Amino acid sequence: MMVLFPIIFILGYVFIAVEHLIKINKSATALVLGSILWLLWFIVSGNNATTSHELESSLLGIAPIIFFLMGAMTIVAIVDSYDGFDIITSRIHTKSTLRLLWLISIVTFFMSAVLDNMTTAIVMVTLTKKLVSDVRSRRYFAGMIIIAANAGGAASPIGDVTTTMLWLGGQISAMGIVERVGVASLLNLFIPLLFISYRFRGKPLANEFDTNKNSIVPSRLDRDIVFLCGIGGLVLVPVYRSVFGLPPYMGMALSLGLLWLLTDIILKRKDEATQDYFKIGKILKKVDLPSILFFTGILLAVSVLEANGQLAGLSNLLTEKIGDLKIIVTSIGLFSSVIDNVPLVAAIMGMYNLSAFPMDSFLWEFTAYCAGTGGSILIIGSAAGVATMGLEDISFGWFFRHITPLALIGYFGGCVAYLLMQYLF
């Protein structure tokens, strides 16, 4: 019976991959996949009390991510409704698609080192939609945003969940991850960026948008206040974590609550039509709920494999059959494009101890790079990818054909760079 779990899991991913062919929404497939796997585990385990506890523990791990995603998407939707991103777009005057691609990619990389990669992806994709009108070109931008966000997150102790886990666990230091993993992460970004640049050489920027905007336009002061408070609230989330130890989802809830309170105060003195147009209830309709449900289903499906021990078994199998840490960690990075990287990194942290592998040793730093950037290989391999998938309506198949080969080249390029640095220094 246990063999059914990976079979059903793979079948579910296949249905997600061919969503546009079978005309079944990926969110529905993901929810069914996660639910069926848990139903099967309740049947197979034979102990409902233990399995219920495992499910509750999994939900405790999933809920913070979902709340975080909802909060980040809502803040970005509020800022967007007040035309806040016009502050940035009005200052970008390039007419070259290639220059804009490089600018967006580099800003995303460094931004994700401060914010988390999922929030960065949401902000940058929303920004790109206001700069590039050509949908086909924008998909390539979105692909580079995913790669850049994950690469930047891997090079920072607060940029990715897995690097934060390793940092708080004492496996890596803040300066160590920036200095050594940073070089590999930059190559992870620049190699795909160089390849994709050939596609946009000499191509003028397509930004012919429909100029028929809503007659209700926020004042410049209101726009600036909402933009500064919204983006400032996102930036403060990792600060709350570092200074006060406040979990990211609670920091995001606080930032959203304060922004909501601010907009209510702003609207108190407005006319009824303006209040109705900018009220949060209407803005919430713009939040991409199907993507949130898709992410929920995927995390539920992965959590079953963690609960029944198949993820840990995979890690142990790699250790027994391969033994070479370089190959094991590289493989774990590839697995993180399919399976959530958090349980994979948690498994490594449990398999190896700090006495054998002290802080900033090869194992931990290479794990931070591989687990952080491997999720870029498939669009469903990272939170940044899943969020972008919904915002730009990118199919699994399109990403696999056009971005996955580039992400793989960048991934292995970064691996080689890090290993070479270890050999030389």
Image (cartoon, helix red, strand yellow):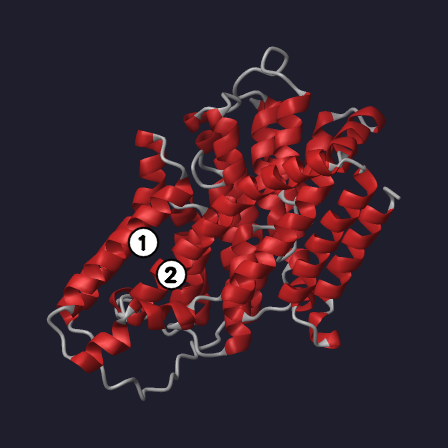
Q: Judge the density around disc 1: few (<14), some (14-19), many (≥20) Cα neighbours within 10 Å.
A: many
Q: Amino acid at mark 2?
A: Thr
Judged left or right of residue 81, residue 303 is right
Q: Which mark is residue 338?
A: none
Dot 2 alpha-carbon crowd within 10 angstroms: few under 14, some 14 to 19, many 20 or more: many
The Cα atoms of the two marked residues, 1 and 2, are separated by: 8 Å
Name which quarter of the figure residue 243 lies in: top left
Identify the image quadrant of the N terminus.
top right
Residue found at the very far bottom of the displayed protein? 212
Q: Nearer the viewer, residue 375 or 91?
A: 375
Image coords of residue 363 (percent x, y)? 62, 25
Q: Residue at x 62, y 64 (%)?
A: 27
**Residue wearing tag 2:** 74
Q: Nearer the viewer, residue 148 or 263?
A: 263
Which residue is labeled 1 in the image?
A: 256
Question: Where residue 204 appears, x then y in whole percent?
Answer: 44, 77
